[in-house]
Image: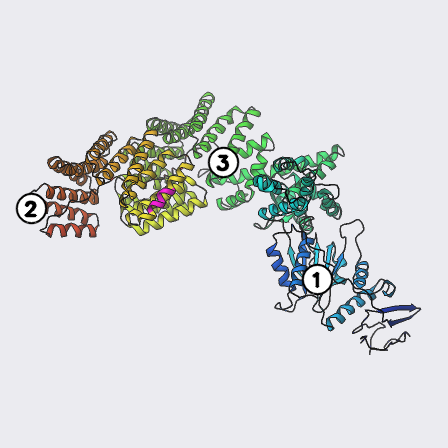
Amino acid sequence: MGGKNSAKRKKSGKAQKQGQGRPGGAVRNDYRGAEFTNSQVLGQGNQTTYVQQYAPVPTALDALPALPQEFTGRADDLAFILGVLDPDRPGDGPAVAVLSGWGGVGKTTLAYAAGHAAQRQNWFTGVLLVDLRGYDPHPAQAEDALEALLRSLGVRPEHLPPPGAGREVLYRSQLNARQAAGERLLVVADNASALAQVQPLLPPGHHGMLVTSRDGLAGLGRMRTVNRLQPEDAVTLLKAALKKNDPDDVRVEENPGAAERVVLACGCLPLALQITAALLAQDPGQPLSERAEALSETEGVLDGLSDGARSLRAMFGQSLERLSPQEQDLFRLLSLNPGPDIATPAAAVLAGQPQPATERLLRQLATSHLIERNPAARGRWQMHDLLRAYAHEQAEVVKARGRDPRRRYDQAHTRLINHYTEHAQAANTHFHPPDSAVSTRFSDREQALAWFDAERENLIATAHTTPRAGFDLGFSLGSYLEWRRRLQDNVVVRSLALDACRTLNDTRNEARAWNNLGNALRELRRFDEAHNAHETALNLFQQTGNTHGQANAWNNLGNTLRELRRFDEAHNAHQTAHTLHQQTDDTHGQANAWNNLGNTLRELRRYDEAHNAHETALNLFQQTDDTHGQAGAWNNLGLTLQELRRYDEAHNAHETALNLFQQTDDTHSEATAWNNLGNALRELRRFDEAVHAHETALNLFQQTDDTRGEAGAWNNLGLTLRDLRRFDEAVHAHQTAHTLHQQTGNTHGEAGAWNNLGLTLRDLRRFDEAVHAHQTAHTLHQQTGDTHGQAGAWNNLGNTLQELRRYDEAHHAHQTALNLFQQTDDTHGQARAWNNLGTASRGLDRFEEAVAAGRRAVAMLAAAEYWFHTGEAWDELATTLTAAGADPGQVRDAWNESAAAYTRAGADEEAAASRAHKDSTEHLEEQLPVGDFSPSEESSGGAGTGAGA
C-alpha cells in the first residue's frame, strides 16, 4: 500500500455511525498498514482526508552525533545495552534499555556509543534522536517529541495530525511500515524525566529504543544504572580531553599521581572531568597538583566545577527542583550525617519522622539518583561527595534564612549524634566482663558487633564533631575496635576521649582515657608512648585514690614492659596488679593479672611458675564464666606446656583455646590459636596437620589485617615446610616473614625469621648465605637485648661453619652459645650446644673432648626426656666414637640408645636407621652435624588486659 507505482487514492471522510466499519466498534480511525511517508493531512469539520504525495520528503535517520574522542571505559555497560538491542537475543521482550544515573555521569554519551556500536553490527538501518529536556523548566511533552520524530521520519509539518492520539498512531504506523519494508530503527529518547514523556514513543515490532534519565523509570524496558567511571578510565578521559585541546599537553603523563587526585576530586564524573579539562586548557601553565589542591577544598569544590557554559551545581539544582518539599528537606538534612552512608533508622531520627515515611522519601531520592542504595548493605543509603557538597550548600542557604531554620537543623544534628552515642554505649555493654549489666537494645554480642561493623565509619566521624561526642564514643568504641583489630582507629578515638576529658575538665575519667590510650598504642607497637601513657594513668589514679584503676594501670603497664623486654619490671607490675585486684575483691581482674603474669614468667623461662599462673587464671576465668578469658588462658597455658616439652598437653590446650575463640567469634585470637596449635603439631611430628594449621592462621591474620601475626604464621609455616624437606617453599616463607616483620618494625621477629632462614639455607647447602643470615639474626637479637635469641643464633652459626669445615670458628660459636644458654638457665639449649660442641671438636680431631661433650649432651637431654633430640645426640656420639676408633661394642651401644630414644619419640624412621647402623659392620663416613637450635616465632594471644573503659 502506498508503493511507488500506486495510484493516487482519495478516501471518503464521512463520519461512520456507531457500529459501522467494525462490528460493535466505536467510531475511530484505523491507520494499520498505512504508509504516510509522503502524505498530506486535510481536515474539515468531521471529515479527514489523507492524500498520497509523490514528491520525495527528506528524512533524518542518521541522527547520532560523533563520539567525543575522550570517550573511554563503559565496557560492561555497552555489553549490557548491546545484549538488549541484539536482534538475535533470546526471548521476546522489547529491545528497550533505560539508562539512569545522576546528572553528568555520562548517560547520553553512553547511549550514543551503544548506538554507534549497534550500527557497526548492522542491527539498525537508521537512528532517531529526540531530546526530551526532562529537567529544563519546561520539559518537552510527548506530542512535541512525536512531532519531532515524525518529521525525522519524513512527515511534513503541514501533514501532521493535530496533538493527540492521532500522532501516536501515525508514529507507530510509520514504524510498522518500515518494519514491513525490512528496516529496523533505533529510537534514542534522551533526558527523560517522566514515564508520560516516553511511553507514547515506545516503538512497535522489532525496532529498538534507548532511554536516558536521571530518574529510575520502571516499566519501559531493561533498566541499567550508569555509575561513575573507574579511576583509571577517568584519568584516560582527562588525558584525552586535554590532548584534544593541545596534542602537546603532557601534564597527565608528567604527574600521574596529581592526575589521579584530580579525577578523584571530580568524583570520576565525566561532566566534572570535561569541565576540569576545559579549565586546564584555558590555563595551560597550571600544574595538575595545583588543580587537585583547589578541588580538594570542600567548601569551594562546586565553584571549581563550572566553566561558564557548564555547571555541576546547576545540573544538581535541576534535579532538586523536581522533588517535593519533603524530599528536598531530607536531601539537605542528609548532609548533616558525618559518615559515608546512613541507615534508614538513623535517617528517620535525623528527619524527625516515622521510619516508614522516611523510607519512602529515601526511595524517591534514590529513584532521582540524588542518593543511592548501598550495594553492600540493605537499608543503607549513600551520597556521592559532590552531591554531599551540594546538599551542604543548600542546607547552609536554608539555615541563613533565620533563627528558626538554624535551630531546626541544629536540633536534627543533635538528635543524630545522640542516636549514634546511645546505640554505641548500649552495644559496648556486650563487651564488658561477665556479670556486668547488659543493654537489651541488642540481643547479644553478635548483634552488637554487626551494628558496630555497619556504623563504624559514622561513629568515628561523629566522635570528631563535639567534645561530648568524642568523650562518649572514645570510651564506647575501644573494645569493639580492639576486637576487630582496627588499631589505628582505636588510637584515634582513644585520643579524642583524652582531649575531651581535658576540654570538659574531667580529671576522674582522664586517668581512664590515658590507660586506654596506652593499650591502643601498645597494639600498634608504639611501646615507649604506651609506657608513658600507662605511667600517667597510674599517677592520676593514685591522686584520686582509685585502687581499681591503679590495678588496671599496673596490669597494662606490665604488658607494655614485657613488649619492651623489661621482664623483671613487668613481673613486678603484674604482681602489684594482682595484689590490688585482691584488695578490691575483683576476681576477673585477678584472672587477667595471673594470665599476664604467666606470660612474663614464660619470657623469664620460669616455666613451672608460668604453668601455675595460667592454671590459676583459667580457674578464675571459669569462676566468672568468662569464655573469652578462658580461651586466652588455655592458649597461653599451651605455650608454656610447649616450653616444658609436654607437647600432647600443649596440643590439647591449643585445641581447647581454638574452640572457645570460635564460640566467641574472635577471628584474630582464633588465628593465634591455630598458629600455636601448628607449633605443637610440628613438635609432635604431625607435619601435614601443622602445615594446615599455619596456613589457616595465615589466612585469618590476613582477614584481620594483622601483619605482625601474618609474619609469625609465615615463619612457623617455614619451619614446618623445612621439616617436610620442602626447602624452597620454606625459604620463601621465611623471607616473607622477614619482610613483614621489617614493615611492622618488629626487630625481635625479624631476628627469628633470619635465624630460621639460615637453617633452611644450610639444608640447601647455600652455606655462605646461611652464615650471613645467622650473623644478621645475632646482631638483631643483640639490639633487642635478647640473650636467649643470641645463644640460638650462635649455635646455628656454629653448625653452618662446620659445614664449611671452619671448625675453630664453629667451636667458638658453640662455646659462646653454651655460655649464653647457661646465663638464661635453658637446660635444653645447653644440651644442644654441648652436642654441637662435640661435633665441632670431632672435626678438629679432639676426640676426647668430643666424646665428653656428647656424653654430657645425651645425659642432659635424657634427664629432661627430650627423646627425639636425645636420639640425635646418641647418633652424634656413635659417629664420634667410630671416628675416635673406640671399641665397636661402645659404638653399637650408642646406636642402640639412639634407636631406643627415637622409638620413645615416635620417630620410627629414624629409629630404623639407627638400628641399621648398629647392625652394620662397616665404618661409617663422618656424619654431618644434625643438632641445631631453631627457635620458632610464637604469637601469644594474651587475653584480658584490664582496660579502664
* Distance from Cα at disc 3 to Cα at disc 2: 67 Å
Q: Earlier in the sequence, mark 3 or mark 2?
A: 3
Q: Residues within 10 Å of mark 2 (few under 14, many from 20)?
A: few
Query: Which residue is disc 2 drawn over?
Result: 889
Q: Is residue 160 above or below residue 284?
A: below
Between 553 and 547, the residue placed more toward the observer is: 553
Q: At numbered mark 1, what does the secondary structure look like: helix, strand or loop?
A: strand
Residue carrying label 1: 209
The reply to whether callout 3 and callout 1 are in contact (CB within 8 Å) is no
Can you say whether 421 is above or below 320 in the image? above
- SS class, disc 2: helix
Local SS, label 3:
helix
Q: Residue furthest top?
A: 543
Q: Residues within 10 Å of mark 1 (few under 14, many from 20)?
A: many
Which residue is drawn at the image coordinates 28% and 35% (left, top)? 793
The answer for how far apart the CA atoms under marks 1 and 2 are is 99 Å
Q: Nearer the viewer, residue 56 or 812?
A: 56
Q: Is residue 182 above or below residue 540?
A: below
Which residue lies under the disc numbered 3?
488
Magenta segment: 730-736
Other residues around mark 3 within 10 Å, as few (<14) / some (14–19) / many (≥20): some
Q: Quadrant of residue 154?
A: bottom right
Image x and y of residue 363, in percent? 67, 51
- Answer left or right for 708 relative to 472: left
